Image: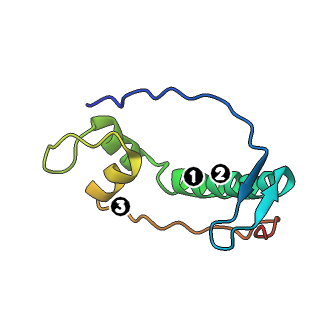
Amino acid sequence: MGVARLMATATCTAFGGVVESSGERVGQGVLFERVGFLAELSRELTGALVASRWDDASLDVLAAGVDERGEVLPSKGWMAMRRLDWPQDVTRRPSTRGTPA
């Protein structure tokens, strides 16, 4: 099975941004709200995706590391899902937080 390359990351602080479509400048409060929304969305979708495939059959396929033709699965999860022809849509529960402005 292939091993994904490690990627280095660094922390940073954003003090402001610009809305591409309008050129409007936004401050840390708006950035915090939008990043929080996207982080929650990612958590919810990832949780739903994992829950939809957390069964013995799916885990056995992933543990084998190969598709039905015997080809090694890609290291990127979304590409492996496509190769295995697994559904790529998940049901998302309505968030308690609204969509950011």
One can see residue 84 in this view: no
Of the numbered discs 2 and 3, the one sitting upstream in the chain is 2
Residue at the spot 65% in from the left edge and 51% down from the top edge = 43
Give SS at disc 3: loop
Percent x, y for residue 76? 37, 44
Q: From this view, report whether residue 27 is shown above or below residue 101.
A: above
Q: Locate residue 95: give its quadrant.
A: bottom right
Q: CA distance from mark 1 to mark 3?
A: 15 Å
CB atoms at circles 1 and 2 under 8 Å apart? Answer: yes
Foreground mark, 1 or 3, reads: 1
Q: Locate residue 15: give its quadrant.
A: top right
Of the numbered discs 1 and 3, the one sitting upstream in the chain is 1
The amino acid marked with disc number 3 is: Trp
Give SS at disc 2: helix
- Residue carrying label 2: 43
Q: Locate residue 91: give its quadrant.
A: bottom right
In the rendered view, does 48 fall on the left or right side of 81?
right
- Residue carrying label 1: 46
Q: From this view, report whether residue 37 is shown above or below residue 58.
A: below
Check residue 37 in the rendering and tell me which mark sits there, or answer none. none
Q: Residue furthest right?
A: 29
Local packing at callout 2 (Cα closer than 10 Å; few below 14, some 14-19, many 20+) is few
Residue at the spot 61% in from the left edge and 28% down from the top edge = 10
Q: From this view, report whether residue 50 is shown above or below residue 12.
A: below
Local packing at callout 3 (Cα closer than 10 Å; few below 14, some 14-19, many 20+) is few
